[in-house]
């Protein structure tokens, strides 16, 4: 690892922009595709750059090894379930709200880590961060201009999608000694295997002609935020470490809100801004506590 240079901060910003761009593109994809199809297209096109990298670097893919059940389980919880839930929720919720709701992942992971890992325990700073962050989310749910009885359930599904990422992250610890590229490629393969029959039996997207913008967004979601972003994440992790890479958490909800306004003219209310600030402050407190602990070790 090295001290971050200008190029590293540029790459971190690009990674945040790519992941933040997923939300408004999911919204556009829902104009023509169902949530199962969107999830399938994401993992199918996302697998291409990851598997090509594994081939280029001669990294063995262990999707069907003795640990196949871990890859299958993580593929379902970390890819299939959240991709489906987010796509389903975004149909009736603004994409900027989805970006903010999904940004609670670091807060949720802190809570789960306290109960399921030996070293990730609560302290005062983390507790304050979690309380501030989730207070922002509760405040966001009180915004009657954007969340009402018609889409309240959809917003909760997006939050559930965020929780799936957290559970998937904990399960990934079971195979943490394996190469990142191998794990990512293997869980993408299993996600494709799981989703393919569901697409065939549940939605059959080939029976209608999709809008051009929806098709472009769906393919983009797979290749860029799902595939290329993971490759970029691997590079940042290798060059600068987890602490530096984790700073992307602050940028995603900010960029997601801005991009939703630019491309979809989504409404940004005062409550959206306040909840966005609260979530970012909450993440800052949690990350600060984690970083101090890492440096002490």
Image: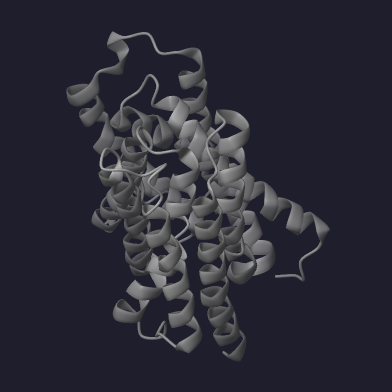
Judge by depth and name the residue closer to the eye, 188 or 251.
251
Residue occupying the point 25% across, 38% down: 194
Judge by depth and name the residue closer to the eye, 34 or 256.
256
Can residue 33 be seen in the rendering of this structure?
A: yes
Judge by depth and name the residue closer to the eye, 238 or 116.
116
Residue occupying the point 41% across, 60% down: 139
Image position, residue 167 (x, y; %):
32, 62
Quadrant in which residue 162 is drawn: bottom left
Quadrant in which residue 27 is drawn: top left
24 sits left or right of 7 in the view:
left
Q: Is 265 drawn above or below residue 212 in the view shown?
A: below
Q: Residue furthest bottom?
A: 296
| Quadrant of the frame with the C terminus | bottom right
| Quadrant of the frame with the N terminus | bottom right
Image position, residue 128 (x, y; %):
47, 80
Number of numbered discs visible in the structure rendering: 0
Can residue 227 be seen in the rendering of this structure?
A: no
Q: Is 277 drawn above or below residue 92 in the view shown?
A: below
Residue occupying the point 42% across, 34% down: 42
Residue occupying the point 63% across, 45% down: 17
Q: Is 23 drawn above or below residue 13 in the view shown?
A: above
Quadrant in which residue 204 is drawn: top left
Which colour style is shown?
A: one colour
Judge by depth and name the residue closer to the eye, 221 or 236.
221
56 sits left or right of 209 in the view:
right
Image position, residue 283 (x, y; %):
53, 68
Image position, residue 38 (x, y; %):
37, 30
Q: Residue furthest left?
A: 201
């Amino acid at each position: 690892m090295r001290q971050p240079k200008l190029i590293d901060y540029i790459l971190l910003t690009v990674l945040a922009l790519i992941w933040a761009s997923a939300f408004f593109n999911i919204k556009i994809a829902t104009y023509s595709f169902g949530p199962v199809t969107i999830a399938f297209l994401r993992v199918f096109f996302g697998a291409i750059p990851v598997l090509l990298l594994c081939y280029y670097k001669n990294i063995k893919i262990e999707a069907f090894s003795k640990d196949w059940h871990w890859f299958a389980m993580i593929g379902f919880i970390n890819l299939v379930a959240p991709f489906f839930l987010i796509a389903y929720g975004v149909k009736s919720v603004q994409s900027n709200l989805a970006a903010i709701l999904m940004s609670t992942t670091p807060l949720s992971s802190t809570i789960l880590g306290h109960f399921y890992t030996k070293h990730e325990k609560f302290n005062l700073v983390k507790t304050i961060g979690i309380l501030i962050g989730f207070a922002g989310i509760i405040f966001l749910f009180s915004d009657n201009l954007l969340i009402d009885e018609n889409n309240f359930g959809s917003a909760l599904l997006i939050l559930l999608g965020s929780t799936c990422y957290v559970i998937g992250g904990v399960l990934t610890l079971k195979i943490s000694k394996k190469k990142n590229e191998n794990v990512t490629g293997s869980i993408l393969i299993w996600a494709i295997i799981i989703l393919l029959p569901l697409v065939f039996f549940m939605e059959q997207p080939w029976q209608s002609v999709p809008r051009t913008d929806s098709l472009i967004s769906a393919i983009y979601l797979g290749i860029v935020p799902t595939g290329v972003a993971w490759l970029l994440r691997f590079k940042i992790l290798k060059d600068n470490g987890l602490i530096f890479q984790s700073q992307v958490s602050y940028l995603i909800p900010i960029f997601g809100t801005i991009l939703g306004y630019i491309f979809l003219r989504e409404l940004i209310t005062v409550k959206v801004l306040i909840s966005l600030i609260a979530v970012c402050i909450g993440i800052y407190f949690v990350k600060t506590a984690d970083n101090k602990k890492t440096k002490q070790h």
